[in-house]
Amino acid sequence: MRDEQAELGVIGSRYRWLVAVVLVVMILLGIRFATLQMIDHDLYASRAEDNRIKLQALPPNRGLILDRHGQVLAENLPAYRLVIVPERTEVLTETLDELSALVEVSSSERERFERQRQRSRRFEAVTLKTNLDEEQVSRLAIHRHRLPGVEIEPYLTRHYPHGPELAHVIGYVGRIDQRDLQRLPVERYRGTTHVGKTGIEHQYESVLHGHPGLERVETNAQGRVLRVLERSAPEPGENLSLTIDLSLQQAAVEALGDHAGAVVLLDVASGDVLALVSQPGFDPNLFVHGIRSNTYNALLSDRHRPLFNRFLSGAYEPGSTIKPFLSLAGLETGAVTPNTQVFSGGHFQLPGHSRRYRDWRRGGHGWVDLEAALAESVNVYYYQLAVELGIDQIARELALFGFGRATGLDLPGESDGVLPTRSWKRAVFNEPWFPGETVITGIGQGFVVVTPLQLAHATAALAGRGRTAAPTLVGNTEPVQMVAHGAAHWDAVFDGMAAVVHGDSGTARAIADMLPTQIAGKTGTAQVFGRPNDDQERALLDEDALPEQLRNHALFMGFAPLHEPRIALSVVVEHGGGGASVAAPVAAQVMARALELGY
């Protein structure tokens, strides 16, 4: 028998539970709706707006780099890139194959495209190839009707119109990599693809880059742009004017010719760098869009080292170009006077030692005073002077002229060179200083190492009678009195350096006719490998017959005009042989051009 009363009780109980559950759910939903509509309304309204409104960065145009007369050294030129919109492409692999038949697409370009495509939405354009030439653009335009989803986009690319002539000064830009991302401010580089990697491009990146602009755009749920709501234009980078004179830079490159080496030309009073050459150079345009691995490897394996910055990081023994500075030290300390006579019989020996330190002229120069010693570059004179001064006094004098430390030029990567002292040798080699090392320091050999930039800066200080400004490529530096010596001492050294070029027996007398006015100069030769001490063995060595890599480096330093110096210069010709025969003519051509231009 059915118990209707019991069944009704069970149904009523279930109904009450159902009603209670429904009521609880309704109350919870009401609370949630109230929270969304009243308490959290602003938060979710903002999130909805963020999903609808996007900010897109607009990269700025990079500033130009100009020489001191406004000649363009680095510019931005219109270029074209090939992009693909995957969403509009029927079969992507077939499209890529077809494009590869029309324009050369390297494996690295294709790999980069695939990486970018995977990070992008299907409706976003992905770059396949940049820097298309006119022929490639024309070929693609002809076949564009059968390549849906393929577009050719214009953009601005960095270009260096003078290529290798200024590569080590200007440097180059390249694609931003992971290391760049770690050091660059993210907000300022949104939308930017390239950054300065070397040279001025790197040193003044913050000036040249500018500030990005922004677009506020409305998008749909998939992120597709529907319309632009607001736009703030990017602020282009500042143009940068260098102290370089393009015509002098080109004159220095032409004067060096096929030789590897460096030329540095400075304004004595202001420190302005007028020419700054490292030869051979390289084409910086190769690096802008990513250099091919085989091209880069060819540059790395080139025995002339085109990527190496010689004026900034080259390490060379100064050779006899150090002699004017030692002359000043000798005059200032009283070790010699302008009239002190020293006999050169062809070699020098320390008392109690058997080793002979040769003069460059067999049989010597006879009796010479300071002027003749500088003019003829008499080694014996400076061997003896170095011994009388001692390494401590030599180091103090050279330090006053800036040897052994960077000049502070506004380029990255400058070397300090080496100014040897007793403490330096103990720290580096854990050995004492030997008397023979003082002897060879007197002619700029041994441990002394300078960069062409250091030598030019020291020459400028010499030309300014101790006063000059630090070298600079951008802006101004204040002149300072680096060295204080007696006027008569400066005069004596100037007379000796003038006799180097204009004296009857000067080592660089052959260039006198190339110059429009009197200058002061000093030749130098830096040994690449040790020569035998024995005169008979030495006679068998013919410099021209040696392999190029074993020939001496040729140096020249000088300033002009003689009596009112305005420019100072250093030249290094790697494996050039002799400073008088190779480096001096290079210097004469550059100086003559500078004087012709009114410097």
Image (spheres, rainbow, N blue to C red):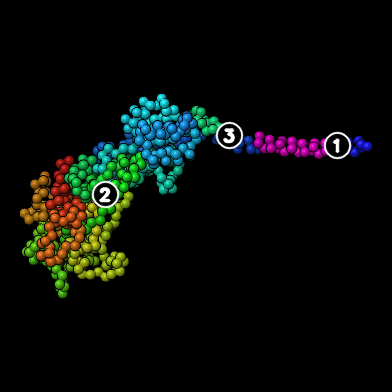
Task: Give the label on residue 12, or none.
Answer: 1
- Label 2, secondary structure: give it: loop
Q: Is residue 192 left or right of residue 296?
A: right
Q: Amino acid at mark 3?
A: Ala
Question: What residue lies at 31% left-to-right and 44% top-to-bottom?
Answer: 295
Q: Earlier in the sequence, mark 2 or mark 1?
A: 1
Q: Disc 3 vs disc 1: which is toward the camera? A: 1
Q: Which residue is mark 3?
A: 48
Residue 274, by quadrant, is top left
Taking the magenta stretch, the answer to whether it contains residue 95 is no
Q: Earlier in the sequence, mark 3 or mark 2?
A: 3
Q: Is residue 160 left or right of residue 146?
A: left
Considering depth in this image, is 114 or 360 the residue closer to the camera? Answer: 114
Classify mark 2: residues with Cα within 10 Å, few (<14), some (14-19) or many (20+): few
Question: What residue lies at 24% left-to-right and 47% top-to-bottom?
Answer: 280
Q: Amino acid at mark 2?
A: Asp
Task: Give the label on residue 302, or none.
Answer: 2
Residue 237 visible (yes or no): no
Taking the magenta stretch, the answer to whether it contains residue 23 is yes
Instruction: Give the distance between the C-alpha atoms of the residues marked 3 and 1, in whole angstroms.
Output: 46 Å
Considering depth in this image, is 431 or 393 the residue closer to the camera? Answer: 431
Q: Quadrant of the C terminus?
A: top left
Q: Which residues are magenta?
A: 9-37
Q: Amino acid at mark 1?
A: Gly
